[in-house]
Image: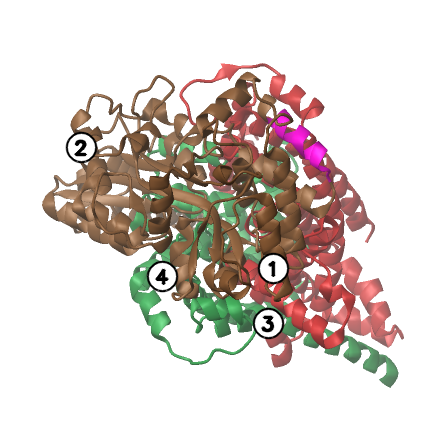
Chain colours: A green, B brown, C red
Amino acid sequence: MKIKGKKISVFSVIVFFASIFWLLPLLLIFINSFKPYNDMMQHFLSLPQTINFDKYIETWTKFDFPKLIGNTLLYTGVSVFGIVILAPMAAYKLARTKSKLSGFCFMVIIMPMMVPFQSYMITLTRLVSNFKLTGTKTGYIAVTVGLLMPLAVYMIHGFIKNVPLELEESAEIDGAGKIKTYFMIVLPLLKPILTTVVVLDALATWNDIITNQLIVGGNASAMNLQNALYMQFSAQTSDWEHALPGIVMSMIPSLIFFIVMQKHIVGGITAGSVKG
Amino acid sequence: MVKKTVAVLMSVAMAGTLLAGCGGSSAASSSAASATSGSSSAEASSEGTAASGEEVVLKVFDAHAYGLDQYAEMAAKFEEEHPGVKIQVQHAANDNTTLLQSRVNSGDIPDVFDIESGTAAQAYYEYAYDWTNDTEVLKLFNEDAVNTGKDADGKVMSLPWTYENMGLIYNKDLFAKAGITELPQTMDELEAACEKMKAVGITAFALSAKETWVLGQLATHFMMDKSLDAAGVVEALKSGKLTFKDMPNFQNLFRFLDLAVKYGPDKPLEVDWETCENMLANNEAAIIHMGDWCQSTLDSFNPDANLAFLPCPVSDKAEDATLLSSCNWTYIVNKDSKNLELAKEYAEYILSSDMGQYWMCDGVGAVPAVKTDKEVQGRLANDAKTYVTEGKTNGWIHTIAPTGYADSMGPILQAYMTGDMTAEEVTTEFQNFWAS
Amino acid sequence: MKNKKVTEFLIFALFVFPAVIFVIFSTDIPFLMNLYYSFFDWNGVGKSMTFVGFDNFIKIFTADTLFWKGVKFTLKFAVFYVVIVNIIALAIALVLSKEKKSASVGRAFYYIPYIISLTAISLIWKFIIGPGFESLYNITGWEIFNWSWLGTGKLAFVVVVVMTVWQNVGFYMVNYIAGIIAVPKELMEAAQIDGANKVQTITRITIPMIMPSISICLLTSLTFAFKLFDVIMVFTKGGPANSTVSVAYNIYKEAFVNSNYGLATAKSLVFVVFVLIITAIQMKVTKSKEVES
């Protein structure tokens, strides 16, 4: 038993050590966010000569970070809220209904996962403008919810298939209606997968560049964080001196968010153990 | 049951109002701005600026990532002089063509926008205001610059921004260190210079071969000689009068690439634009191929670097070595703009007024297309001026070549550098590209 | 009776249609609108288009070598990516699906690349492969660090695979963890009482129990691989010498650089049909596995 136990721990040790390789970028970005442009290019891997937060402060004011963070928070909050309400409802009903309509709806939702975004983004902007939503926050959020929906529905759908039917049946015998069953019985069971979806979608929205560019492009006041930072780059110039501090600052919220949320993913053990 | 249903409906409705709510409070949106008549006023006023309800929003699209601070100053001044006018700029340096294309397609055409002159700009001319009869405005600009904004019929559909010059840029200190006193003007002299530098341990070339656009631009030097200008070459190639096989200097391109590999860094195809400019400015390489647009980056690397243009040798004749000069960016005014007069005024303002010149000369550091005596900041731009006056320049081919030129031909030249294609195959590919 | 059917439909509509509407609006309709352009010669900007019938499709199948090169690259990438990323993510998830502090920190580490913007990621990789490898070569003297990783087609392919796996492994890890922690503890305990060792519990209990997670990860990794774009756009730019041009990148260039919008939409159509066939096969296979378990 001991030897076997050790085998696994050797494996664990490898996983833990390898994680440093994944941490590397964070360190490198952090280190380099304190360097002048030339130092960065010349000595990317060495420590900065001085640590001062001038560039951080400059970036904060130059890009109007409070406004950007406000926008990005709004987008992330509302989009994820929309997903969390709508995706599990759809996924649940689609998983439990066996009909042609159900199959068709599932296909309609899943199909976009196969299509490269680049192939329809022009027509998307045209459609958005037909609804007079170009440049608006509403338009951007609606599109974001639509783009995130397929994966969310697909993931929850896969999870629900594993939830035993008996629970719902017994609830219905107890006289609960379909909708009550969903909210009282099904939704709590979905906590682990919902948390996963929230984490994935929140970070996707937080880090989005291209959709924001396309939908709100012309309206600087509706820009999100990453888009504003990305604007500083062109084929022939890059403003790393502001971009790296900006990236560090924009990452802090998402990192904290992930650390907090992942406890709930794993904490789902209790919720998951209800079944079986 | 009923209660629950209501609860669900409520929550859905809530999500809906949330969405709508943030739309309402959202700023002066572009779509609202395009509908300057009527509905926009409510939204525009919620923005809080000049809440008169009669605010006019001018939508501007600008494809430059440098001189942004000066641009902001300039736009602010214009707003100051025109109360009730708000300038809404989208600075979209990266992916600018994609974003412009999507805006035009969605009907959200900016009132004033810029694009690279030549083939790229032609596509937008059907949306462009025709300046031909505005002679008062056109008089302000140098004639050759105005010519870059003409369509096939000779109508002036766009206004020029600044001159941009490209060629080889060399590090004077390194040349001096290697004992090179005369600038190389022919292929043989160039090779001799490389050899001299190698002898004292200097990396002669840092050609940015990772960038297909650099290779595409470089190749155009070898399509010209002094007998034909850029437009003439493109014309002759299109009509089939000239082929790449008969081009007198084209085979020297391969000799040049060989030199760049032989006297360049160990991994030539990994050198991107940032690396090559960094090497040049920090005295790690002597020659790169670039244009004066890289001045600001070079300065941020090493403001004391001793750099200058070197007309690119293309043959065994000294007079064939030239810089390539053109007004690359060109500004178009949307002819269907709701505020056409204002849009025209703004375009004229940024391209010719004192504030505009301040932006171009001090912010960007380039020579404006407008006639001016103003001192230009960029040293490379000033250096290029002397070659312009000496007549040692030619025009740009890559902007008037068929669409996708650099993206199609750049990889082919990379294949030559890695040894996957022969000079002959590359020549055929160039010919095929032009013929199709 | 009929009344019940109506109510059932209404409930179905209430649950499903809102989601469907959002998806239709932001993807399905724009994509279908695109079909129209595939029969036209259009530069993507101008007001006029020329109807060309099936010419664009004919061109794809007869004259477009770069597109097929991209298809080959994308398929090859998909195979390597799907296999490697899933194995690594599953391995990490098995170790880190515990409620320990250390596991929690480890999970955050693996997730970091997924939340950093790609512009920064490519900056870092540029320097790891450049000066980083150079100093490693000086220390170790191993030739592997002296190869031109981005200057050679075959090596650039490896770089793209390693980089995307490295960047996205956290995503699949989270999915696998969500699956693993849902496996009832009693089952594992029962197996261990029956004398199964750890490896056996993993292969006999855990893996069959997380088949849904596996099929989710397989499909998402497969669709990601087919849509590979960002890394190519920001990092390799399709180079060297077009060796890392993916299909999505080729479509993008065709539409926005070569200004052949009609041809580009035709390409995306051809490719989507292609992808649908492959994913349909993949879903069939994993579904049959799920039933078995």
**Dots 2 and 1: beta carbons under 8 Å?**
no
On what subunit does the disc labeled 3 rest? Answer: A
Q: Reply above or below: B258 against C179.
A: above
On what subunit does the disc labeled 1 rest? Answer: B
The percent coordinates of residue B109 (x first, y second) are 32, 32
Outermost residue toward the right? C195
- Please state which of the two labelled residues, at mark 4 or mark 3, is closer to the viewer: 3
Q: Tag 1, which secondary structure? A: helix
Pointer 2 residue: B38
The answer to whether any part of residue C17 appears in the image is: no
Mark earlier in primary sequence (4, 3) = 3
Q: Reply above or below: B68 against A55.
A: above
Which is more toward the observer, B390 or A27?
Answer: B390
Pointer 4 residue: A69
Quadrant of the rendered structure where residue C71 is?
top right
Q: Do tags 4 and 1 sit on the same chain?
A: no
Pointer 3 residue: A23
For badge 3, the amino acid type reads Leu
Q: Tag 2, which secondary structure? A: loop
Q: Which residues are magenta?
A: B421-433
Q: Residue at x 36, y 47 (%)?
A: B64
Pointer 1 residue: B196
Q: Tag 3, which secondary structure? A: helix
Which is more toward the observer, B129 or C79?
Answer: B129
* Mark 4 crowd level (few <14, some 14–19, many ≥20, 10 Å Cα): some
